[in-house]
Image: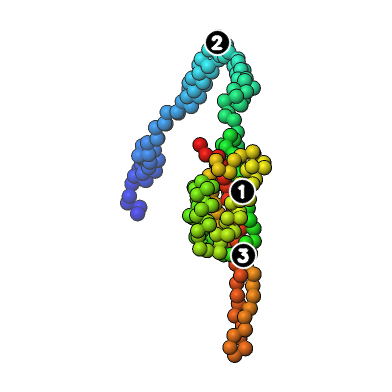
C-alpha cells in the first residue's frame, strides 16, 4: 500500500462527484397547461348566447294571448229542443198499438170455470170475424167454453152501444185472449189411504171490438 502514488487517491475523490453530476441530467420542465384561457373562452361564449337571447326578447315582445270568445250555448239548446219530435203516445197494457182515432170496445170475464187451453180452442174460431158471424159460430160450437164466450161477446156489444153509441152489426172482433187464472186445489181419496190432488182450473177471458172500415 505504501508503493501506490498519492495522486491517484486525490484524483478519484475529485472525479467521482463530477462524474455523478454529469451522469444524472436534470429533467426537462413540462410546459404548464393554460387553464385560464379555457374558462374565459367559455364565459365569452355564454355571454354571447345570453346577449343573443336577450336581444330578440327586448326587440320583439310576445303579444298577449286574447281570451277565446265563448260560444253562446243557449240558442243551440233552444234549437235542439225545437227539433225534437213530439212524444209518442204510450202503448196499451197488452202491447197493441192503437191510433188516437181508433175506438176499441173491450169486455173482460174473470175466474171463468174452464181451463185456458179449452177456452183458446173456441176463441180461435171467432178471431177477426164480424159480430153476426161470431154469434153463429158460438151457437153451433159443441163446447162448454162457447157459452162463456157468447156471453162475453154480448157484453162487449152492449158496452159499444152504451158508451160509444155504436151499432153491434157494424162491429168486428179485433182480438180475443184467454189467460190462466188461479187454480183451486182439491183432493180425492184413493186406495190404501192415499189422496190424489185435483186441480180445478180457471181462466180470464178478454175480447175487443172495433167498427168496420
Residue furthest to the bottom in view is 192
Q: Closer to the N terminus: mark 1 or mark 2?
A: 2
Crowding near the residue tagged with mark 3, few <14, some 14–19, many ≥20 C-alpha atoms within 10 Å: some
**Circle 3 residue:** 113
Please identify the quarter of the rendering in which residue 179 is found.
Answer: bottom right
Q: Pointer 2 and pointer 3: residues touching (CB < 8 Å)?
A: no
Work out whether 53 lies above or below 138: above
**Circle 2 residue:** 60
Rendering coords of residue 44 (x, y %) = 50, 18
Q: Which of 51 and 93 is in front in this view?
A: 93
Disc 1 versus disc 2: nearer the observer:
1
Q: Is mark 3 on a helix, strand or loop?
A: loop
Rendering coords of residue 192 (x, y %) = 59, 90
Q: Closer to the N terminus: mark 2 or mark 3?
A: 2
Q: Closer to the N terminus: mark 3 or mark 1?
A: 3
Disc 3 versus disc 1: nearer the observer:
1
Counting every numbered tag in the picture gives 3
> Mark 1 and mark 2: span between their CA atoms?
93 Å
Work out whether 104 lies above or below 46: below
Rendering coords of residue 64 (x, y %) = 60, 15
Rendering coords of residue 51 (x, y %) = 53, 15
Where residue 156 is drawn, which disc sits there?
1
Q: What element carries label 2?
A: loop
Q: Is mark 1 on a helix, strand or loop?
A: helix
Amino acid at each position: 500500500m505504501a508503493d501506490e502514488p498519492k495522486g491517484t487517491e486525490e484524483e478519484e475523490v475529485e472525479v467521482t462527484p463530477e462524474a455523478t453530476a454529469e451522469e444524472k441530467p436534470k429533467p426537462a420542465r413540462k410546459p404548464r397547461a393554460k387553464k385560464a384561457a379555457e374558462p374565459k373562452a367559455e364565459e365569452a361564449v355564454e355571454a354571447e348566447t345570453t346577449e343573443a337571447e336577450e336581444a330578440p326578447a327586448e326587440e320583439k315582445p310576445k303579444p298577449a294571448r286574447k281570451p277565446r270568445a265563448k260560444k253562446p250555448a243557449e240558442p243551440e239548446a233552444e234549437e235542439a229542443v225545437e227539433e225534437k219530435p213530439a212524444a209518442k203516445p204510450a202503448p196499451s197494457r197488452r202491447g197493441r198499438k192503437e191510433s188516437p182515432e181508433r175506438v176499441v170496445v173491450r169486455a173482460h170475464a174473470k175466474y171463468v170455470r174452464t181451463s185456458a187451453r179449452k177456452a183458446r180452442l173456441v176463441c180461435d174460431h171467432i178471431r177477426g170475424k164480424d159480430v153476426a158471424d161470431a154469434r153463429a159460430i158460438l151457437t153451433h160450437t159443441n163446447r162448454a167454453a162457447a157459452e162463456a164466450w157468447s156471453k162475453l161477446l154480448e157484453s162487449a156489444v152492449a158496452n159499444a152501444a152504451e158508451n160509444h153509441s155504436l151499432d153491434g152489426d157494424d162491429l168486428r172482433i179485433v182480438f180475443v185472449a184467454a189467460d190462466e187464472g188461479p187454480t183451486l186445489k182439491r183432493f180425492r181419496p184413493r186406495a190404501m189411504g192415499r189422496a190424489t190432488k185435483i186441480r180445478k182450473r180457471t181462466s180470464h177471458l178478454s175480447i175487443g171490438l172495433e167498427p168496420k172500415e
